[in-house]
Image (cartoon, rainbow, N blue to C red):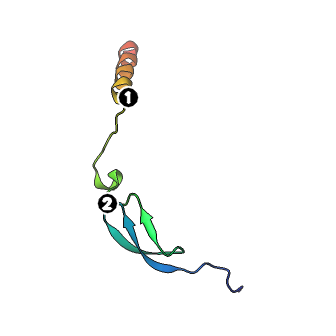
Amino acid sequence: MKKNLHPELYEVTARCACGASFKTRSSSSELKVTICSQCHPFFTGAKRFIDTAGRIEKFEKRYKKIKKKSA
């Protein structure tokens, strides 16, 4: 096998923006993440919709109009 081919692995503590931390291995010596499994909506079950300018309501209005026409 060739020497010095693979990067060096470090055992690091990854820190999330929410304050949670977990241990993992990485080729970089420090890990900072913006979202983790403790604060991600998919894993927590909390759905947060950021509705700018009523986009969800506009979609619902259009969908209801199309549904009524086809029925």
Residue at left offset 72%, top offset 85%: 2
Image spot of residue 30 (x, y percent): 46, 72
* Disc ID at residue 55: 1
From the viewer's perspective, is residue 66 above or below residue 36? Answer: above
Image spot of residue 71 (x, y percent): 36, 15
Q: In the displayed image of the protein, which residue is found farthest to the top?
A: 69
Residue at left offset 34%, top offset 69%: 21
From the viewer's perspective, is residue 70 above or below residue 47? Answer: above
Helix, strand or loop at label 1? It is helix
Q: Answer left or right for 4 relative to 38.
A: right
Residue at left offset 34%, top offset 34%: 51
Residue at left offset 50%, top offset 80%: 10
Image spot of residue 7 (x, y percent): 61, 78
Q: Amino acid at mark 1?
A: Arg
The answer to which of marks 1 and 2 sits earlier in the sequence is 2
Image quarter of residue 64 = top left
List the residue tagged with mark 2.
18
Badge 1, how many Cα within 10 Å: few under 14, some, many 20+? few
Image spot of residue 66 (x, y percent): 40, 17
Q: Amino acid at mark 2?
A: Cys
